[in-house]
Amino acid sequence: MTQLKTLYRQIILDHYKKPRNLGKPTDSSYTIIHQNNPSCGDDITISIKVKHGIIEDIKQEGSGCSICCASASIMSEMVKGKTTEAAKDLSLEFSKMLLNQTINTEKLDEAIAFEGVKDFPARIKCATLGWKALESAIKEED
Ligand code: FES
């Protein structure tokens, strides 16, 4: 295994073991979206609190494989404090990476750890589940 692959594996494992922004919304101002993967039964709930176009807070929780849960954790860290437009842009960039299209690697930050998932089409849904839930939550906000 290359050093880079080992690093990516460590990032994924770290987020799987210590998920960031884990939990439920703390008040009624959050938009909550539940998304599941029918092929495996895993599900994820994303709650966002948006003020003046900025994601002030995000909570995520659910059950799933390590790729699914770690990806939601990294996503939550990346979009917290960003505008909804910037978050949508990041989500698009993440999808492009999994479709093997040209990407801005700097923008993707730790989410680059999922680059290898593009070689495993069955796992792409795992990696994108949290991001898709985020997109739906932002759409509800608009
Ligand atoms: Fe279900 Fe990964 S196996 S989301």
Image: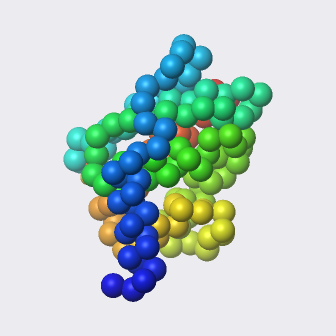
In the displayed structure, 131 sits above or below 113; it is above
The answer to whether residue 100 is left or right of residue 45 is right
Residue 140 occupies which quadrant of the picture?
Answer: top right
Find residue 59 and report its horizontal and vertical position in percent. 49, 33
In the displayed structure, 33 sits above or below 98; it is above
Whether residue 26 is visible, yes or no, is yes
Q: Quadrant of the C terminus?
A: top right
Find residue 47 and report its horizontal and vertical position in percent. 50, 29
Q: Who's the residue at 43% across and 70% down the image?
A: 8
Q: Who's the residue at 35% across and 60% down the image?
A: 13
Q: Quadrant of the N terminus?
A: bottom left
Find residue 67 and report its horizontal and vertical position in percent. 35, 56
The answer to whether residue 129 is left or right of residue 37 is right
Residue 43 occupies which quadrant of the picture?
Answer: top left
Q: How many marks?
A: 0
The answer to whether residue 75 is left or right of residue 142 is left
Whether residue 117 is visible, yes or no, is no
Outermost residue toward the left in this view: 40
Find residue 87 and report its horizontal and vertical position in percent. 64, 46
Outermost residue toward the bottom in this view: 2
Q: How is the image coloured?
A: rainbow
Residue 92 occupies which quadrant of the picture?
Answer: bottom right
Q: Who's the residue at 31% across and 54% down the image?
A: 66
Outermost residue toward the top in this view: 28
- Taking depth in this image into account, of 60 and 95 the one nearest to the observer is 60
Q: Who's the residue at 43% across and 36% down the image?
A: 22
